[in-house]
Image: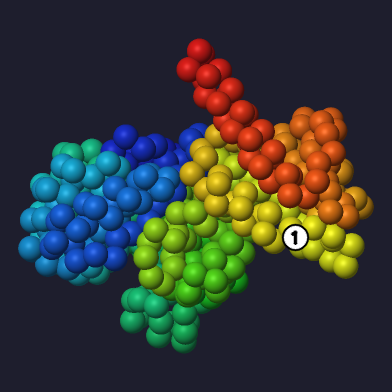
Amino acid sequence: MKRRPTSTVAVGNVLIGSEHPVVIQSMTNTDTRNAAETIEQINLLASAGCEIVRVAVPDEEAADALVEIVRDAEVPVVADIHFDYRLALRSIENGVSCLRINPGNIGSKERVREVVLASKDKNIPIRIGVNAGSLEKEILHKYGMPCSDAMVESAMGHIALLEDLNYNHIKVSLKASDVPMMIHAYKKLAAKVDYPFHIGVTEAGSVTKGTVKSAVGIGSLLAQGIGDTIRVSLTGSPLNEVPVAKDILQSLGLRKEGLELISCPTCGRCQVDLQDIVERVEDYTSDIAVPIKVAVMGCVVNGPGEAREADIGIAGGKGEGLLFKKGEVMKKLPEKELVDELLSQIEDIVTNYRGESNES
């Protein structure tokens, strides 16, 4: 998939831009002032596959906690700052790998200059984070309501503030809870600048509804080559966000790691308990990071064809099923033996893959 050409920024040891893989981000929902709890959540996110984590910095106590958080976090930490430029300066001093600010709302140009100089000194990027829910009053007055043009104008104003200070270590986000507005805003800004984009649908909602909105919004942009780092925003634990982000990237071929499970929706032709089989396979394979394509199909119409395209797969029949591997039928098995044999074959593939990786 051809990516929109962008510059590259480094957030700690993570490179973001069109020449690098799309990066998964999330944000803690802990009280940042509680360093131990925040560190624990960051590292759980890292274990789940998150590569950058943002934390809210609402006051000086939270900024001071960053010393410990940055030291013990397993991934780069981004400080989320609003209004108070002094919190940005203290966050930089305390070791964060990136700032998320809107330069226009942290004070005078001289205060912006101080933040830029400190960022340059530490070689850290700034993410300009435009949100449809917090646009400048004058822009809202001009357009009457949040819209994609208003978001782009806001972003360009913030970008100009930094560029006027000869600073271009920038990435940009244009988030809205309205999916079409968010898509249009990113596409319009993509025609104006070559900075990398952090994309996401903000306040997307619950795990179910938010997953759908995020998949549509983020996925449609990524399918057009737009987007260099993503965050799925879901109400509740941020640990729910990372698997969704990984699935979005995997569905577009932007990530090859992890198991890809293909299963049919079932219909009147299905004569095996496919839901139970799929659930057992998902439970068994949830922690597998090896790139494997597994097909679990319920009938002999589409089942054999899909199973043949997978690394390993089964196609059910009446109380029995076929086991396929790399396009070849291996054996016919009674339904009660299908899952155990499939899981055994998956384990063999994982073991062989890891052995080959270690040899290389």
Q: How far from the left and from the top, in percent, is residue 249?
A: 57, 48
| Residue sitting farthest toward the top | 359
- Can you say which quadrant of the picture contains the N terminus? top right
Q: Residue at x 41, y 72 (%)?
A: 235
Q: Position of residue 164 (x, y in %)?
A: 29, 51
1 and 164: which one is in front?
1
Q: How many marks?
A: 1
Q: Which residue is mark 1?
A: 273
Q: Residues within 10 Å of mark 1 (few under 14, many from 20)?
A: some
Task: Give amino acid for label 1.
Answer: Asp
> Is 91 on the left-hand or right-hand side of 199?
left
Quarter of the rendering containing residue 65 = bottom left
Q: Residue at x 80, y 58 (%)?
A: 272
**In the rendering, at what x and y percent does residue 227 appear?**
52, 50
Residue 275's x, y, as percent? 69, 61
Above or below 292: residue 83: below
- Determine if residue 323 is in view: yes
